[in-house]
Image (spheres, rainbow, N blue to C red):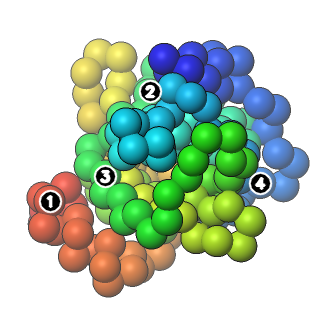
Amino acid sequence: MTRTLQLAFATFRPRPAVPGQTLFSPSVTTMRVHPGDLDLYRHVNNGVYLQMMDVARANFIADLGGYRLLAEHGWYPVVAASTVKYRRSLTLGQRFTVTTRVLGWDERVCYLEQSFARGDQHIARGVVAGRFLARDGRRIPAPDVVELLAGEHVEAPELPDDVAAWAAAVDVAHRA
């Protein structure tokens, strides 16, 4: 429940936009492990990582000043697919960061990397394929969202090979 409330706060009372933040600037969210994040083995539950990633993506949009822009168009983000690779555990009380950055996009979705770290230690890496929908149910092409958030037309960088292969494997990538 804690992370759901944190997401609601990050979405409806977003942090201020970061001056100079661009679409390709990393967005860093600092968190601490709470008792409700833990599973029976006393480390962060795998499902909670996804909730933490939701909060960090909300902060990424806020850092760009994107919530006002999205609201003006009636657009909102949803997750089309995600994957996480875990390397180390997070336990009660530990502080950590989630760094969110854009990897690229195609006609359907935007691809984001979300890296968890505790100091210099790499904890986990998530990759998310995010889509935007309109309030009337329409799917918004990713390049339209990118242009809105960037404030200009931006060419998509080439996706890393592992992300392109994953997107094809889970059938989320744009089909020609």
Q: Earlier in the sequence, mark 1 or mark 2?
A: 2
What residue is rendered at 81% in x and 32% in y?
16
Toward the front, the furthest residue is 41
Can I make out residue 129 in this image?
no
Q: Residues within 10 Å of mark 4 (few under 14, many from 20)?
A: some
Can I make out residue 136 in this image?
yes
Q: Residues within 10 Å of mark 1 (few under 14, many from 20)?
A: few
Q: Is residue 84 above or below residue 30?
A: below
For marks 1 and 4, give the one nearer the viewer.
1
Q: Residues within 10 Å of mark 3 (few under 14, many from 20)?
A: some
- Reading the image, the residue beneath label 4 is 21
Instruction: Tell me the kind of residue under disc 3.
Output: Ser
Q: Is residue 89 above or below residue 95?
A: below
For marks 2 and 3, give the one nearer the viewer.
3
Q: Earlier in the sequence, mark 2 or mark 3?
A: 2
For marks 1 and 2, give the one nearer the viewer.
1
Q: Earlier in the sequence, mark 3 or mark 4?
A: 4
Instruction: Tell me the kind of residue under disc 1.
Output: Val
Quadrant of the snapshot with the C terminus: bottom left
Q: Earlier in the sequence, mark 2 or mark 4?
A: 4
Q: Is residue 21 above or below residue 35?
A: below
| Label 3: element kind | strand
| Label 1: element kind | loop
- Reading the image, the residue beneath label 2 is 75
Q: Write down the quadrant of residue 161 in the picture.
A: bottom left
Check residue 82 in the rendering and tell me which mark sits there, or answer none.
3
Q: Give 76 or 88, whichever is nearer the viewer.
A: 88
- Reading the image, the residue beneath label 1 is 170
